Amino acid sequence: MTVELKAVELVLQERIATISFNRPDALNALNEEVLEQFIQCLKVVEESEADFLIVKGNGKVFSAGGDINMMMSPSQSERFEQVMDLINEAVLTLYSLPQMTISVLHGAAAGLGLSIALASDYIIAERHTKIAMNFIGIALIPDGGGHFLLEKRIGAHRAKQLIWEGKTLKAEEAHQFGIIDEIKEGDLAKHVEDYLSYWLKKPSRALKETKRIYVETSVSKLKQVLALEKRSQFAMSQSSDHKEGVRAFLEKRVPVFNQSEKDISEN
C-alpha cells in the first residue's frame, strides 16, 4: 500500500512502513503542510500491522529543518501556536509509536529535522551526512523536544554545549557523541534492508514491549519539555535578535546580536 500525499509519502509493505519527506526542491524543509501530512502518515502506521518504521527524506538531504518562509510570514505571530502544536504532535506521536522506528539520514539533518530524527529509536546515517542543532544561529532554541531528546542520548551537559554552540557535526563526530547509532558507506538503502532483515527475525512483540516500558516511563517528561519549548520559543520568536538572525540568514552574512533580557520581557 502506498499513500502519496503532496509533501510526504507513505509505503506499507507487510511488516515495514516507510515515510519519506518529499520536498526535495526545498531540501525537505518542514512547513505546516509537511507536518500535517507527517502526522497523518504516523497515525496510519500506528494502526497498521507494521512492526518497523523507516523515516527518510527524498532528494539530497534528510531535512534542512523548519521552513524559513514560516518565520518570515507577516502573520507568523498569529500562526505560532498552530505551528508549535503541529511540531509537538508530530514528535510526540513518533516517539510514542509502538513500532520500532529508524531514521535514515543522508546529506543533512538540521534543526527541527534533527529533532525528528532523534525522536526515533535508531539513527543510521550515510558517512557524508552532516547534522546541526543550529537554532542558535537565528536566536531560537531547539523545539520538537530537542532538549529532551539530546539529553536522552548524550546527557544534559553535552546537550547544552551542542545547543549553545550550534555547530555542524560530521557523521563521524555525531557518532562519537552518541547522537548517531550507525554510519554506513555506499548504498544506504541496501544497508537499511540488511539491518531490517536482522530485526525481522527477532520476536517483535518482545521488542515492542521493551519500547512501551521506556516510552511510558519517559513520555511525561517529553510532554513537559515540549510545553516549555513552546512557551520559550514564542518569546524568542518575538525578539529583535531573531529578526536579525533571519535577515542575516537570508542575506548570507554573520548576524549581529544585541538582545537583552529587558528586550525579551517587553515583547
Image (cartoon, rainbow, N blue to C red):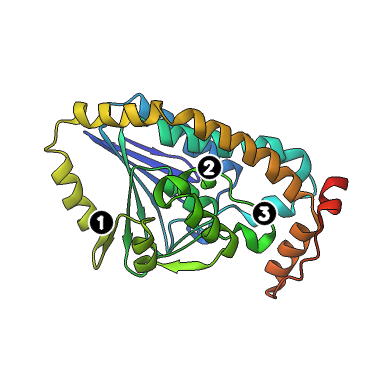
Establish if 99 lies above or below 121.
above
The label shown at residue 140 is: 3
Of all residues, the one furthest to the left in this rendering is 201
Cα–Cα span, label 2 and label 3: 14 Å
Q: Residues within 10 Å of mark 3 (few under 14, many from 20)?
A: many
Cα–Cα span, label 1 and label 2: 28 Å
The residue shown at (39%, 62%) is: 174
Q: Which residue is mark 1?
A: 189
Residue 89 appears in the picture as rendered: yes
Q: Residues within 10 Å of mark 2 (few under 14, many from 20)?
A: many
Q: Secondary structure at mark 1?
A: helix
Which of discs 1 and 3 lies nearer the camera? The answer is 3
Question: Residue 102's spot in the image, x, y percent?
Answer: 32, 45
Establish if 33 lies above or below 131.
above
Q: Which residue is mark 2?
A: 145
- Quadrant the N terminus occupies: top left
Q: Secondary structure at mark 3?
A: loop
- Left or right position of 50 against 169: left
- Left or right position of 135 against 206: right
